[in-house]
Image: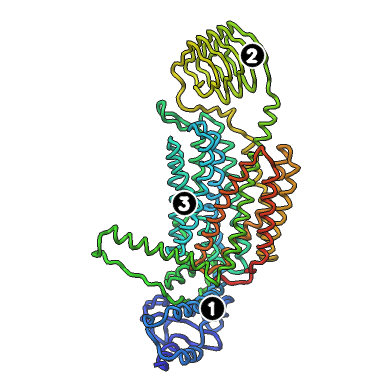
């Protein structure tokens, strides 16, 4: 029996002068002509177009074993046994051996396909998806000042809106990253982007705070799932020598997303007229237009992705040889045509596929109801995802996973904590400067006077106001303390941070104002009337939106450009580990200089320096995470680590924001120590730049 199998193998492969030539499947799928396949004249894609003087192109696959070697292995293995009677551990060992052979063969195939038009097209398509992730991080921070007025948000609600997106991203990264290893890169990325686009679009129209919060949560879930898929997907079309550099170039789109969001916020939100109203209940203000515009990169990527193929590496992993071969041939032909060499022939005829050990049970349409069948499929898939998660913690990968988890977490805690802390500190410095310019009026007496202008940043103490009118005016940061209002009339008054403390108000009428009960602190109201109070909250874009915050975010995003370029050029020269460790340690040093940031300009400068220094660590982390795990666990592992990263972002935002205006010492020391610890631990990770993609 062993001899017959060896003879069959020698019929399939022809060994000539050390090179293995064509493999022709029985269905004639790869034949060059329409004639039936015959041993003498069958032409495969390997030999089609070749004559006796043709050279063997560099990168032609040389790795199919010699029939003698196969025969020897079969002798050692003994009689063939059906898979159903073999131990699972034995099947897994065979699969591991197959995967190692496939990894080296696939590397040779990708080198033969070359790096050209196909990879650059995919680069821009996936770049738009990564850009959408960068936009999502900034959107809430930009709309918050306007949304809090439009939706009457309290301080706790504002904090929840800021954190809900990260919560969605955390769940999405783990869930959709895991599904990408089971359902496919392209399919899950389309699902991810579709969820984000749909709910981001919907969130711009909803009026209620609860529904808006829900939409941003689901939108974050979608875009969070895209990040691990994008890097796993793109890496599987790159050769070893191109992988580090081009994955780093891809990271630039996150920066472009931040720049896009900042520029759009700067140009759209301050324009109050860029909206419309339907009655008194529905208002579509300019900040909602901004949310709508920010969904465009996601929609563009979603449309373009429909024209891109699935990852052939993933298809080979699940045993779909023919589909993978066709895609690799498409990559090869696209690149060769772009290089002006359309005559170059794709020389690969057979690709190793790993042993399939998963048990799939096809559920017949007559079995149960439709929802029972779907329930079985969903629970089976989720169980496989959970098994993949546990596999990342097995002995083979446990140490790498734990070290990467610490590095991802410390990096996220410091980076996301500080990028929220910087704008808050700048805003705090502005408020301090604003309060220092307050005007104080003591014991003023005003009677029979009409106020129809804006009062801002003032304190009035022990004043008397009799028979005065306050009509069509605005109060901003105004306090009346121990004052008397008698026979006064307030009409169409809008106020921001305005309070009456220990005042006596006699025979006074309030008509169509937003001077609500909570703005009168320990006051005595005698024979006073409140009529037709203003409903809802009111936006004043000239006052409530701070152009400087947009500028800070824009400069912070732009400052990572030098770091992106340097990391891309040096990633394959100095290695991933040195890049992570060096970048994190330099970023820690930058944190210490924040002690000297006592002005707005100084804080902006140190923020730009910190962002520029830390981006190299982010890029290298993305690359090494892709390279450390095998294809069938790659997106799952990336999703777990990225989910942990978002958890670090939630903690960083909460902790750092709580110390604004109290002390700078705790945030700076916490960020610095986390970066130093994570950077030193990163130096113990294995280097992967010479490693083929398993």
Asked whether the residues under the numbered discs 3 and 1 touch, taking CB atoms below 8 Å apart as contact, a structural biologist would say: no
Viewed as shown, does residue 675 lie left or right of 42? right
Q: Point out the frontmost of discs 3 and 1.
A: 3
Asked whether the residues under the numbered discs 2 and 1 touch, taking CB atoms below 8 Å apart as contact, a structural biologist would say: no
Q: Residue at x 48, y 66 (%)?
A: 390
Q: Quadrant of residue 573?
A: bottom right
Query: Within 10 Å of the Cα at label 2, are there few (<14), some (14-19), or many (20+) other Cα atoms?
Result: some
Alpha carbon separation for disc pair 2 and 1: 92 Å
Q: Position of residue 224 (x, y in %)?
A: 50, 53
Is 345 above or below relative to 13? above
Q: Residue at x 52, y 38 (%)?
A: 156
Q: Residue at x 59, y 23 (%)?
A: 476
The answer to whether residue 603 shows anywhere in this view is yes
Q: Residue at x 49, y 22 (%)?
A: 516
Q: How is the image coloured?
A: rainbow
Q: Position of residue 230 (x, y in %)?
A: 52, 58
Q: Which quadrant is home to the N terminus?
A: bottom left
Q: Position of residue 213 (x, y in %)?
A: 46, 41
Label drawn at residue 462: 2
Q: Point out the frontmost of discs 2 and 1.
A: 2
Label drawn at residue 222: 3
Alpha carbon separation for disc pair 2 and 3: 57 Å
Q: Position of residue 241 (x, y in %)?
A: 62, 68
Label drawn at residue 61: 1
Number of numbered labels in the structure image: 3
Q: Earlier in the sequence, mark 2 or mark 1?
A: 1
SS state under label 2? loop
Is 693 above or below relative to 290? below
In front here: 375 or 350?
A: 375
Q: Point out the frontmost of discs 2 and 3.
A: 2
């Amino acid at each position: 029996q062993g001899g017959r199998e060896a003879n069959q193998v020698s019929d399939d492969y022809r060994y000539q002068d050390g090179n293995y030539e064509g493999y022709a499947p029985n269905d004639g799928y790869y034949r060059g002509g329409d004639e039936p396949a015959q041993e003498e004249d069958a032409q495969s894609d390997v030999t089609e177009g070749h004559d006796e003087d043709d050279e063997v192109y560099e990168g032609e696959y040389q790795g199919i074993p010699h029939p003698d070697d196969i025969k020897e292995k079969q002798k050692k293995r003994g009689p063939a046994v059906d898979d159903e009677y073999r131990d699972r551990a034995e099947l897994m060992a065979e699969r591991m051996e197959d995967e190692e052979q496939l990894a080296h063969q696939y590397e040779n195939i990708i080198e033969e396909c070359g790096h050209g038009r196909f990879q650059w097209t995919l680069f821009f398509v996936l770049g738009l998806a990564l850009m959408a992730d960068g936009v999502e991080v900034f959107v809430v921070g930009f709309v918050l000042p306007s949304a809090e007025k439009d939706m009457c948000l309290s301080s706790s609600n504002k904090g929840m809106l800021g954190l809900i997106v990260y919560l969605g991203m955390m769940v999405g990264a783990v869930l959709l990253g895991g599904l990408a290893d089971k359902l496919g890169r392209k399919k899950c990325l389309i699902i991810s982007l579709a969820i984000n686009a749909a709910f981001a679009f919907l969130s711009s129209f909803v009026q209620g705070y609860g529904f808006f919060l829900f939409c941003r949560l689901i939108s974050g879930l979608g875009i969070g799932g895209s990040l691990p898929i994008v890097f796993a997907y793109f890496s599987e079309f790159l050769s070893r020598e191109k992988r580090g550099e081009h994955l780093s170039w891809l990271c630039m789109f996150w920066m472009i997303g931040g720049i896009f969001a900042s520029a759009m916020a700067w140009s759209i939100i301050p324009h109050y007229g860029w909206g419309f109203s339907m009655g008194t209940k529905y208002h579509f203000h300019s900040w909602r237009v901004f949310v709508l515009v920010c969904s465009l990169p996601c929609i563009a990527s979603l449309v373009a992705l429909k024209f891109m193929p699935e990852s052939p590496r993933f298809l080979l992993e699940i045993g779909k040889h023919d589909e993978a071969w066709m895609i690799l041939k498409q990559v090869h032909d696209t690149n060769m045509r772009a290089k002006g060499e359309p005559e170059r022939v794709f020389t690969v005829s057979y690709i190793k596929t790993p042993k399939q050990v998963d048990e799939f049970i096809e559920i017949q349409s007559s079995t149960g109801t439709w929802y029972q069948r779907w329930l079985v499929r969903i629970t089976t898939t989720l169980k496989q995802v959970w098994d993949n998660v546990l596999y990342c913690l097995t002995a083979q990968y446990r140490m790498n996973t734990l070290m990467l988890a610490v590095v991802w977490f410390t990096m996220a805690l410091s980076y996301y904590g500080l990028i929220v802390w910087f704008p808050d500190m700048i805003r705090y410095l502005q408020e301090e400067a604003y309060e220092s310019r307050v005007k104080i009026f003591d014991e003023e007496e005003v009677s029979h006077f009409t106020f129809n202008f804006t009062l801002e940043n003032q304190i009035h103490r022990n004043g008397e106001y009799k028979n005065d009118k306050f009509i069509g005016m605005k109060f901003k940061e105004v306090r009346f303390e121990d004052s008397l209002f008698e026979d006064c009339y307030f009409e169409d008054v809008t106020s921001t941070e305005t309070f009456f403390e220990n005042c006596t108000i006699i025979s006074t009428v309030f008509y169509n104002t937003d001077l609500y009960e909570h703005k009168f602190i320990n006051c005595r109201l005698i024979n006073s009337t409140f009529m037709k109070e203003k409903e809802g909250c009111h936006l004043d874009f000239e006052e409530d939106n701070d152009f400087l915050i947009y500028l800070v975010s824009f400069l912070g995003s732009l400052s990572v450009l030098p770091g992106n370029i340097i990391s891309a050029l040096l990633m394959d020269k100095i290695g991933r580990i040195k890049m992570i460790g060096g970048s994190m340690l330099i970023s820690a040093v930058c944190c210490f200089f924040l002690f000297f940031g006592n002005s707005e300009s100084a804080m902006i400068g140190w923020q730009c320096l910190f962002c520029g220094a830390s981006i190299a660590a982010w890029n290298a982390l993305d690359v090494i995470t892709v390279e450390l795990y095998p294809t069938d666990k790659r997106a799952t592992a990336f999703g777990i680590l990225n989910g942990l990263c978002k958890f670090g972002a939630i903690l960083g935002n909460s902790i750092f924001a709580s110390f604004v205006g109290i002390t700078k010492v705790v945030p700076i020391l916490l960020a610095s120590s986390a970066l130093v610890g994570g950077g030193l631990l990163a130096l113990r990770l294995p280097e992967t730049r010479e490693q083929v993609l398993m």
